[in-house]
Image (spheres, rainbow, N blue to C red):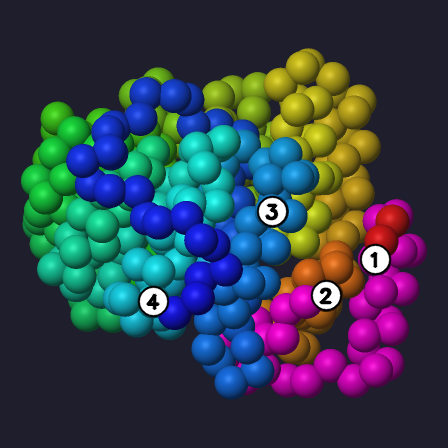
């Protein structure tokens, strides 16, 4: 299948554990689809370039927003190869390899490590109820399959029904050793809970909220970055906010934060009426020829809906 990239996949013997820092805006990039639901590799390449041009600090592909859960194993491998080959090491790639079962997760982890990713992200096993012992065993088995590879926990309680508390995360650190836990993405999190991760996990484990606003409020106490799906159409604004925070420019960070607040109000309105289909229209407005996103059918946008969405973004202060 044409992946839109002529470079061959990186061979396994070329891979090695990354030691560079992982911080800032990690993009949970969407995968583009054709009208029939087939992966659109050419447009996905354009999406990768769009984020690189915006200056994102890394990628967190094939999670929830990256549609990993609705791709077949071979499809996930092809997209993973495409991303690594396109990024060419310019920024870190934390490849999400989690599935509902340990064996498939191991297969994807080995493949990702063979490509030379900086770390692998792992969501807890989902669909079936799992007790703590089973969750720890899941992470330990994956770690043993890719010795020494840096790992990320992907905590998404809303979709997995497994909550990775700070205490559980510390237990996972013990179970996966000597693999380092370099990060945890925590979705749907209140600020007081976020602080629990920052203060109770080792400094070597970066905390990445699934909300861009938690980065603004939490950076000063140690939040490392953000992995925020709703703001993916506006990467440059997220990058500007992070860079301002890093430089101690609170006024500049506040300006970008306020813009993102207004933009998220617009996006949220259409998420409630059109589901994730709003991101297809948003990507089109950003000049990306996405035929379909997500992979499943969503409520269609009328011409009025499209015009209202564009007007809403412009009124929020975003220049298209």
* Lower sequence index among marks 2 and 1: 2
Placement of 178 over or under 4, stated as above or below: above
In the visual, does 69 lie left or right of 169? Answer: right
Counting from the top left corner in percent of width and height, residue 174 is at: 13, 30
In the visual, does 72 lie left or right of 265? Answer: left
Instruction: Spot the residue most to the front.
Output: 6
Q: Kindly report the distance in space between the C-alpha atoms of the residues bearing marks 2 and 1.
A: 13 Å
**300 part of magenta stretch:** yes
**137 part of magenta stretch:** no
In the visual, does 69 lie left or right of 318? Answer: left
Camera sees residue 280 = yes
Tell which of 46 and 185 is nearer to you: 46
* Lower sequence index among marks 1 and 3: 3
Q: Nearer the viewer, mark 2 or mark 1?
A: 2
Mark seen at residue 284: 2
Camera sees residue 271 = no
Q: Kindly report the distance in space between the C-alpha atoms of the residues bearing marks 2 and 3.
A: 15 Å
Counting from the top left corner in percent of width and height, residue 222 is at: 48, 21
Q: Which residues are magenta?
A: 289-318
Mark seen at residue 172: none
* Residue marked by disc 3: 49
Q: Residues within 10 Å of mark 2 (few under 14, many from 20)?
A: some
Q: Residues within 10 Å of mark 3 (few under 14, many from 20)?
A: some
User: Is the C-beta separation of discs 2 and 1 under 8 Å?
Assistant: no
Mark seen at residue 313: 1
């Amino acid at each position: 299948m044409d992946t839109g990239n002529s470079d061959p996949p990186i061979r396994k013997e070329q891979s090695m554990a990354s030691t560079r820092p992982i911080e800032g805006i990690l993009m949970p990039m969407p995968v583009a689809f054709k009208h029939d639901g087939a992966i659109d590799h050419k447009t996905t390449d354009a999406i990768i370039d769009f984020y690189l041009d915006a200056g994102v600090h890394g990628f967190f592909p094939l999670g929830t927003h990256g549609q990993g859960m609705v791709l077949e194993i071979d499809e996930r491998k092809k997209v993973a190869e495409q991303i690594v080959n396109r990024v060419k090491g310019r920024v870190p790639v934390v490849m999400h390899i989690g599935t509902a079962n340990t064996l498939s997760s191991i297969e994807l982890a080995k493949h990702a490590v063979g490509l030379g990713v900086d770390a692998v992200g792992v969501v807890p096993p989902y669909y079936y109820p799992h007790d703590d012992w089973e969750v720890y065993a899941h992470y330990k088995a994956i770690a043993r399959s890719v010795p020494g590879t840096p790992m990320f926990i992907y905590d998404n309680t809303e979709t997995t029904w497994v909550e990775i508390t700070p205490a559980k995360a510390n237990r996972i650190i013990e179970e996966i050793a000597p693999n380092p836990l370099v990060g945890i993405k925590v979705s749907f999190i209140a600020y007081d809970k976020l602080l629990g991760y920052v203060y109770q996990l080792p400094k070597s484990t970066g905390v990445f909220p699934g909300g861009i606003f938690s980065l603004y409020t939490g950076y000063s106490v140690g939040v490392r970055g953000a992995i925020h799906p709703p703001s993916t159409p506006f990467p440059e604004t997220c990058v500007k906010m992070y860079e301002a925070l890093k430089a101690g420019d609170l006024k500049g960070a506040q300006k970008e934060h306020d813009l993102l607040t207004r933009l998220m109000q617009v996006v949220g309105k259409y998420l409630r009426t059109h589901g994730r289909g709003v991101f297809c229209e948003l990507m089109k407005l950003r000049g990306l020829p996405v035929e379909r996103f997500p992979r499943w059918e969503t409520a269609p946008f009328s011409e009025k809906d499209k015009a209202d969405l564009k007007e809403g973004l412009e009124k929020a202060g975003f220049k298209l």
